[in-house]
Amino acid sequence: MRISGLAATTGVAVATLKYYLREGLLPPGTATSRTQATYDEAHVSRVRLVRALTESAGLSLGAVREVLAALDDPPPSRHDLLGAAHHALVAAEGRGRPGGDEQDTARRRARELVAERGWCDDPLLVDRLAEQLRAADAAGVVVSDDYLRSLAAAADLVAAADLTTVQLEPAAALRQVVVGTLLTDPLVLTLRRMAQVRASQEVFGA
Amino acid sequence: MRISGLAATTGVAVATLKYYLREGLLPPGTATSRTQATYDEAHVSRVRLVRALTESAGLSLGAVREVLAALDDPPPSRHDLLGAAHHALVAAEGRGRPGGDEQDTARRRARELVAERGWCDDPLLVDRLAEQLRAADAAGVVVSDDYLRSLAAAADLVAAADLTTVQLEPAAALRQVVVGTLLTDPLVLTLRRMAQVRASQEVFGA
């Protein structure tokens, strides 16, 4: 199809598609003349992915580029693959501000939680968790150790469910972990709000 | 303290504080002359809250205004209070695009999940969940019924933990539900990533 057909199929304006092409978010079509090219189903699904990552997952175009680069270059083994997936996710989202010193309470708590659960101690994620704990504290939101442990237990459930969705073929698995996590993040937060209302009725009465 | 003292205490530039004052995000100080005013601890904590909501929770200034308006006007009873908290959260975050028709698969799935778990069927939240399901589908991310149920079970755990943090005094409870949810959302997503790495090692071997 021509670029106008790609626009009609995806509902994305031609000007936006040209922008994606210039920015390297969409691979060039097959040239049919000096000024025209044709696009195929791979382009349709790539445009849909870019839209989903920007509109639904709220990523910047720079972050989308990082994610696409990781997806376009899957590592050969499954073990490397999950490392690559996490690298893409963490790179796409940025790190927390590194804390002032080693005595920093938020950082100590983040490290203790990770050790207690046998989780990944990726310094980017530890920095991010520490900064989120600091931000909650600065806003007067109390995050007790018990509360943090409860959130961690729920995270283990989500992660176990996430892993059941991963297929065996490396490229598909990579896509599912990276894109699946980014696109189901908002869903996890919506479910939390829905569940809060029932939990509050149980506590306070209807 | 003067506005310069408020800036020094909070680490927020005077120009930004003046902007918050003009936009009504920060209540005026007590005037001490025609051009000067003093600010107190309540201003310090309000500035920290605005920073946390914009920087850590990623809210727009319009959304922050909605949240602050709800916090400044707590309803008298606890039951109304949780309704008010949810109204503030949902208003701050916007609704999903209402789906085309009643046959829409994503909307039907959202409704079925809510009914199955006895959750809140607030149409704003149902619209949002339906749109998130559509977005995942458009990006080629498979969200099976089993997977959705697992995420829902984890959401029930998070919500039960959330409710243990709620205090009995209405204004404090409102603040904890609204601000606590917004500021711990990013934390929930970071924990998910940390937990995924361990879950993947269990599935694929280290």
Image (spheres, coloured by chain):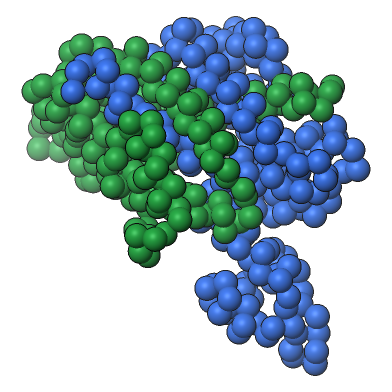
Chain colours: A blue, B green
Residue A196 position within the rendered picture, expressed as x and y whole percent measured from the top left: 34, 27
Judging depth in this view, the residue of B33 and B50 nearest the camera is: B50
Residue B190 position within the rendered picture, expressed as x and y whole percent measured from the top left: 58, 28
Residue A206 is left or right of residue A125, and the answer is: left
Residue A11 position within the rendered picture, expressed as x and y whole percent measured from the top left: 52, 73
Residue lying at 40% horizontally and 16% vertically, measured from the top left: B161
In the rendered image, is residue A194 in sight?
no
Residue B83 is left or right of residue B111, and the answer is: left
Residue A177 is left or right of residue A128, and the answer is: right
Judging depth in this view, the residue of B125 and A59 nearest the camera is: B125
In the rendered image, is residue A173 in sight?
yes
Is the N terminus of chain A in the top left, top right, bottom left or bottom right quadrant? bottom right
Judging depth in this view, the residue of B17 and A204 nearest the camera is: A204
Q: How many numbered marks are there?
A: 0
> Which residue sits furthest right?
A76
Residue A167 is left or right of residue B37, and the answer is: right
Residue lying at 69% horizontally and 32% vertically, measured from the top left: A163
Where B134 sits versus A200, above or below?
Answer: below
Residue A33, quarter of picture? bottom right
Residue B204, quarter of picture? top right
Is the C terminus of chain A in the top left, top right, bottom left or bottom right quadrant? top left
Where B183 sits versus A183, above or below?
Answer: above
Residue A107, quarter of picture? top right
Where A175 sits versus B191, above or below?
Answer: below
Residue A73 position within the rendered picture, expressed as x and y whole percent measured from the top left: 84, 51
Residue lying at 80% horizontally and 54% vertically, measured from the top left: A72
Residue lying at 76% horizontally and 74% vertically, measured from the top left: A28
